[in-house]
């Protein structure tokens, strides 16, 4: 099973330091929630783990291999990355869209195996009944599940999800998070997910990483990291943390 290790990385955008000596570990079957204000480095961390960005200092390891020494196709077979915004043609069918997730394995054309893997990925997120629908005919929650299915079509061991509940109403937010939780428990995927909702991070994460100014401010069990004191220090807000309900209420 795949373990992610991020060791003392510094990441820059030109002269701006976006990540400062960040070290984390994520294990199989674990949902790691990444929280913090806008600009704290959450998305940069995911992009660096996926190998899109290269650290100036430090290293990222997936399955014991340094990401920067791996070919993109090799990384794509191990890691499924779902960015905040996904570009696609609204006139594509769900099946055609999910098939594009098989690109790391495709030769000259799609095979029966690719079609089976795409259908299986849709089943994993309970979206196989949407297979013939066009993308512009889907609800927000349905579309988000289909986007996750595309990343699952390559059968990655690692899922990197950047704000998968953004712009969804509460019902679909819970629906997507429940599917993420199931993938970790049943398929033993290693999942890192950035979230703005602290209650969701508390309820659906095995481990929480709280970031501030490109650094890891706190990391550990949700009840240890999501505290009124930490929220005040990182977000500058007064909050009441109800441990018995796994809920955060802002005052």
Image (cartoon, helix red, strand yellow):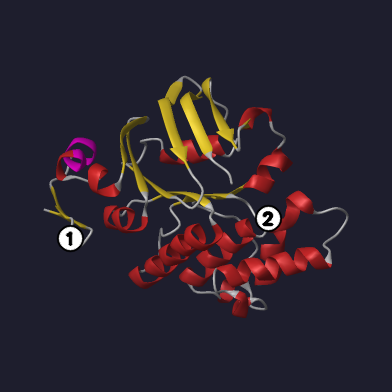
Please give the count of numbered marks on the rendered protein. 2
Q: Is residue 8 above or below residue 99?
A: above
Which residue is denoted by mark 2 in the rendering? 154
Residue under the point 82% across and 62% down: 110
* Residue named by callout 1: 244
Does the magenta portion include 231? yes
Would residue 91 be visible to someone looking at this image?
A: no
Helix, strand, or loop for circle 1?
A: loop
- Magenta stretch, main secondary structure class: helix
User: Which portion, as a residue range, is magenta?
Assistant: 230-235
In this rendering, position of residue 118 left or right of residue 51: right
Viewer-closest of 182 and 52: 182
* Percent coordinates x, y for residue 1 in the rendering: 59, 46
Q: Residue at x 72, y 35 (%)?
A: 71
Label 2 and label 1: CA atoms lie apart by 39 Å
Q: Nearer the viewer, residue 212 or 90?
A: 212
Give the left or right position of residue 163, taking residue 244 as reference: right
Binning the other alpha carbons within 10 Å of mark 1 as few (below 14), some (14 to 19) or many (20 upward) gives few
Q: Position of residue 135 (x, y in %)?
A: 60, 70
Residue 221 in picture, x, y percent from top left: 30, 45
Q: Which mark is residue 219?
A: none
Classify residue 73 as left or right of residue 173.
right
Residue 66: image x %, image y %?
62, 29
Q: Is residue 189 visible?
A: yes
């Amino acid at each position: 099973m795949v373990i992610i290790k991020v060791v003392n990385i510094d990441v820059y955008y030109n002269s701006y330091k976006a990540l400062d000596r960040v070290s984390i570990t994520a294990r199989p079957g674990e949902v790691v929630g990444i929280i913090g204000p806008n600009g704290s480095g959450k998305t940069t961390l995911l992009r660096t783990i996926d190998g899109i960005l290269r650290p100036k200092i430090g290293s990222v390891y997936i399955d014991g291999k340094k990401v920067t020494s791996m070919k993109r196709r090799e990384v794509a077979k191990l890691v499924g990355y779902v960015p905040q915004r996904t570009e696609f043609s609204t006139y594509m069918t769900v099946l055609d869209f999910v098939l594009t997730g098989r690109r790391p394995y495709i030769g000259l054309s799609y095979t029966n195996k690719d079609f089976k893997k795409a259908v299986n990925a849709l089943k994993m997120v309970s979206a196989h009944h949407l297979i013939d629908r066009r993308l512009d005919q889907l609800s927000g929650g349905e579309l988000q599940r289909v986007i996750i299915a595309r990343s699952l079509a390559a059968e990655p061991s690692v899922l990197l999800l950047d704000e998968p509940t953004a712009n969804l109403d509460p019902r679909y937010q819970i629906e997507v998070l429940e599917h993420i939780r199931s993938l970790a428990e049943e398929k033993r995927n290693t999942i890192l997910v950035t979230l703005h909702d602290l209650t969701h991070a508390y309820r659906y994460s095995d481990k929480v990483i709280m970031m501030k100014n490109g650094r890891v401010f706190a990391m550990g069990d949700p009840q240890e990291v999501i505290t009124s004191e930490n929220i005040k220090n990182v977000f500058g807000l007064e909050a009441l943390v109800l441990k018995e309900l796994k809920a955060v209420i802002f005052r």
